[in-house]
Image: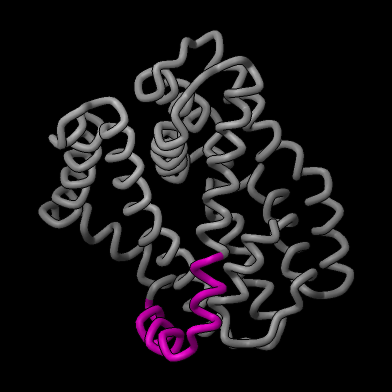
Amino acid sequence: MLAAALALMGFVPIRLSLWTTVLVQYAGSFIRIAAPAGLGSLAINTRYVTCQGASAGLAISAVGLSQAVGLLTHVPLLLISAYLTGANRFTDFSPSPTLVAVVLVLAAGVAAVLLVPRLRGLVVERVRPYFQGVVPQLLDLLQRPRRLAMGVGGTLMLTSGFVLSLYFSVLAFGGQADLAAVAVVFLAGNAVGSAAPTPGGLGAVEAALVTGLSAVAGLPVAVGLPAVLLFRVLTFWFPVLPGWGAFHLLQRWKAI
């Protein structure tokens, strides 16, 4: 939650209270049990920034910039982790099967969006409101290295925290897996969960992580399944109750 708060504060050009922003991230974990993955946090962060004095356009573009930077860091981390996973398993320098599969899937997705007019129009229509003001915000951010470092650093800390949580969940059930392989599984599973229409990616994330731990990390289902369930309890379900409290407290403060 602290990492998510730092990431948001880095991309928003107005002063935000650290601990209030942390509470907003907890409130977002409560909201996401009723909203598709990503949308709940996006909505509550935008509402919070607006209530702190930013215009609606500035709030949407700043939160959109944080989402865009998250995507820009997500893809390279996935490719690097996939390469490291292959490098640990093979003695030559040829691309690993995981890396090849990831590149092919990403290429197919980009090609589908670019070549199919209806799909391209649908994607543009959905993302335009969130990324309309991203370029001006990004240019402003590049002139403020401290804010940029806080935003990118918070994003990387957040991803690292999730990866380590999944990794230690595997270790808790006696599994032995390479950290890079677990990173590949989480990053790919997170992408699947973001695309799923269910609240918080429920069902889709669990299935993707269990399958990934088996296919990429080589773990048996008897280890992968309880590890994934523990990971989801710790990162998805446990924050719900304090998130409920934070949500009502922030409403009382008129912060959201």
Q: Residue furthest front?
A: 91
Out of 147 and 229, give the one closest to the viewer.
147
**Residue depicted at 58% across the width and 24% down the height:** 170
Q: Is the residue 40 above or below the residue 62 in the image?
A: above
At 16% across and 48% down in the image, what residue appears? Answer: 112
Residue that protrudes farthest toward the left in the picture: 115
Q: Is residue 148 magenta?
A: yes
Q: Residue at x 28, y 57 (%)?
A: 122
Q: Quadrant of the N terminus?
A: bottom right
Type of secondary structure dominating the magenta stretch: helix
Q: In this view, does 159 lie above or below 210?
A: below
Q: Which colour scheme is used?
A: one colour
Stretch of the chain drawn in magenta? 132-153
Which residue is drawn at the image coordinates 60% and 23% (left, top)? Answer: 171
Q: Does the magenta stretch include residue 105?
A: no
Residue 154 sits in quarter? bottom right
Is the residue 46 above or below the residue 4 in the image?
below
Picture quarter with the C terminus: bottom right
Q: Position of residue 41 (x, y in %)?
A: 60, 58
Q: Is residue 26 left or right of residue 127?
A: right
Tell which of 125 and 185 is nearer to you: 185
Front residue of 1/131: it is: 1
Q: Is residue 128 above or below residue 195?
A: below
Residue 21 relative to residue 214: left or right? right
| x, y percent for residue 69 | 42, 66
Could you tell me residue 110's position as x and y percent?
19, 52
Number of numbered discs visible in the structure rendering: 0
> Measured from the top left, where is residue 20 in percent x and y?
78, 70
